Every structure is written in C-alpha cells, then in structure tokens.
Amino acid sequence: MAKMSLGLDIGHREIKGVQLQGRGRSPRLHSHASTATPDRAIVKGKVAQTDNLSAALKQLVQDNGWGGSWTVLGLTHPELVVKVVKFPLMRERELQEVISFELDQMVSFSFSSPEDVAYSYEVLRKVDDEQEVLFAACHMDLMMPYVKAARAAGLEVAVVDVQGLALPKILQESNHYAFINIGHSQTHIYVEIDGMYRISRLLSIGGDHFTEGIMDAYNLSYSAADSRKRSYDVDNLLTHATGSVSSLRSSIQQLVGGALQTLDYVRAQERVTSIGEVLDCIYLCGGSAQWKGLPELLQEELELKVEVVDPFALCPNGTEASDGNVSYAVAASLACRGLERE
C-alpha cells in the first residue's frame, strides 16, 4: 500500500492540511483543506488555548477523514533557533555528545535541563578537518502544546519540522532559489543553493500589516480592507488612497528591505558581486502572495525573477493553480517531507 502523509500548518489565522499519497517526485494529492484558527488560540506564535485549538483541529480531521494520519507538523517562531555550526571532524556518537553538552551555548533561550530542549541536527558537509552542521532547536514549552493539540485531535504526530525548510520539496527542479513565505503576522525567508542550507530568517511583517495599512489609507474596517487588498493591486491602493498611505508604504518597505538584507548576506557569504550569480529565482508563497502586483514589485526591487509557487505542481492529479492554492505551500511541503520516511 502506498504511503500516506499529512502536512499540518497551524497559523495565527488559519489551519491548513495537505494529505499526499505515494513516493518520489510524483506524489498523488489525496486531499487538502483548511479551517479558521480559533480567536486567540495562537498568540505571538505560541499556543494560548490548547482546548480551543484542539477542537478546531478535531473538526478539520473529522471532516476530511484524517484520523490517525501519519503527520508532519510545521513550527515557526522567533525563539526557534536555526543555524549552521562548525565542528571538528568526529564520529557521530561523539558529535551527539558534544552538541548535547554545548546546548546552552547554541540556543538563545534559557532552559533548566537538556530535557527542556527539542533539537535536531544534520551534517551538511565535511571539508578538510571540519564539518558543517545544520542545527535546529526550540524550547519544549513552545513545541509540545502544538503536538498535544494535534494528538488530541486524533493525529499521529511523527515529525515536527521547521516551517520553510521543507519548501524546496514542492519544486519540480531548480537548485538555486529563495522562498519568501508571507504569513498573516510574519514572513519567513529561506535560501538554499545546490541543495545546501544558506539562511533561514523570520521578519516581523506579514499580511495583517498590509491590511492594517489599507485600513488607515481608506478608513475601512479590517474585513473591508482585506477585501480591498484581494481586489486591487499594490499600485492602485497606494495611488488612490483617501487617507495616509504611510503605514502601508512602510509595511511594504519593511518586507522589501528585509528581503534585500537577507539576500545581500547570502551574496557576501558566497563571495559574489551579484546575488543573481547564485540564485535563479525567488518563489513567493503564503496568503499575501495572492496580492496583485506584489510579485512584480518584489521582482523589480530585488532584481531577481519572482514566481508565485504552485504547491501541487508535483502531483499528477494536482488541482490547477489558483489563488487559493499558494497558501497551502507549507502544508504541502511538510507532507512531501513525510513521504520520505523509510
């Protein structure tokens, strides 16, 4: 029987799930669905109301027949540490012991004992007498409420992964790319070159900030501003405002500036004069990737090709690309991650 995997993306405003079946580069799309995240269930990236979150998840699971599904859960938060660390060459067991011993120096949050830290690592490459290790960690108090809510909803949470790091798995081909995943409250930028991690960065700017800027510019309620954002392009909203556009313009500049800074860091690390020498394309995903004119604006400012990703392009039976599908990119990539299990 073909493998099944459910990717689960729990956001501030929406919970999205994608279930894939099969293996390799052509998985079959079994189902995908979403539901609203209960109000105040997630606050600043942390679970604040486990019971409410679990109830919403349970209904989503029941509606789509996902009960008992082998699940990969995505996690993102400013306190989640993702970085490359260099170590001398040593055996795997010795490396594990060294990392465990040096945890307090490798994470940016406080903890009482190593058992308070959820962490994982992967050796990226070995050069001469050194090895580069990709290290990811967070406090158990950040991760476990998500896991408990998903398990209470009837899911088998087998893997917890960093949101964004699996995104390359939804591409059919390309080895030099960046992803800009614009969520409701934050944006995740991830760069990978030749299959190797380069940087993962979280910006405190997202779709809600754009909507709030439109509220100020047109004196609208949140829902009316969000509707206008879906109906008009960026230039139109900036040039036809009846009020101040300073907040909207500032939010856009923060996104562009954060992306430019991140790409310039990669350029410097790769020791090239132009980021275009090492990156072919930027893939845009998340709800605000649907904002008309934003891909074109980013392409002009970043001086790189920008494409809105189709998360189901790998699936022979995948639905045709539509505005709604792009928001499933993280969930689809996590499901792909799950199909790689032995």
Image (cartoon, grey):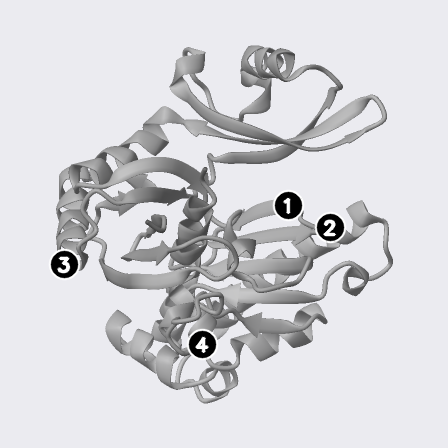
Question: Callout 2 environment at 10 Å: few (<14), some (14 to 19), or many (20+)?
Answer: many
Q: Which residue is mark 3?
A: 63
Q: Secondary structure at mark 4?
A: loop
Please state if 189 lies on the left or on the right of 221 as rendered.
Answer: right
Q: CA distance from mark 4 to mark 2?
A: 27 Å
Q: Which residue is mark 2?
A: 266
Question: Can residue 135 be seen in the rendering of this structure?
Answer: yes
Question: Which callout, 4 or 3, points at the residue further toward the start of the chain?
Answer: 3
Question: Callout 3 environment at 10 Å: few (<14), some (14 to 19), or many (20+)?
Answer: few
Expressed as whole percent of the image width and height from the top left, the position of residue 178 reads: 63, 58
Q: Secondary structure at mark 1?
A: strand
Question: Which callout, 1 or 2, points at the residue further toward the start of the chain?
Answer: 1
**Res 135 label:** none
Q: CA distance from mark 1 to mark 2?
A: 7 Å
Q: Which residue is mark 1?
A: 199
Labelled pair 1, 2 in contact (Cβ < 8 Å): yes
Q: CA distance from mark 1 to mark 3?
A: 37 Å
Camera-side residue: 229 or 147? 147
Expressed as whole percent of the image width and height from the top left, the position of residue 63 reads: 14, 58
Q: Residue at x 39, y 75 (%)?
A: 214
Label 3 is placed on what type of residue?
Answer: Asp
Question: Callout 4 environment at 10 Å: few (<14), some (14 to 19), or many (20+)?
Answer: some
Q: Which tag is nearer the camera, tag 2 or tag 3? A: 3
Q: CA distance from mark 2 to mark 3?
A: 43 Å
Q: Is residue 311 above or below residue 2?
A: below
Question: Callout 1 environment at 10 Å: few (<14), some (14 to 19), or many (20+)?
Answer: some
Question: Which callout, 2 or 3, points at the residue further toward the start of the chain?
Answer: 3
Q: Secondary structure at mark 3?
A: helix
Label 4 is placed on what type of residue?
Answer: Trp
Labelled pair 2, 3 in contact (Cβ < 8 Å): no
Camera-side residue: 158 or 250? 158
Camera-side residue: 244 or 60? 60
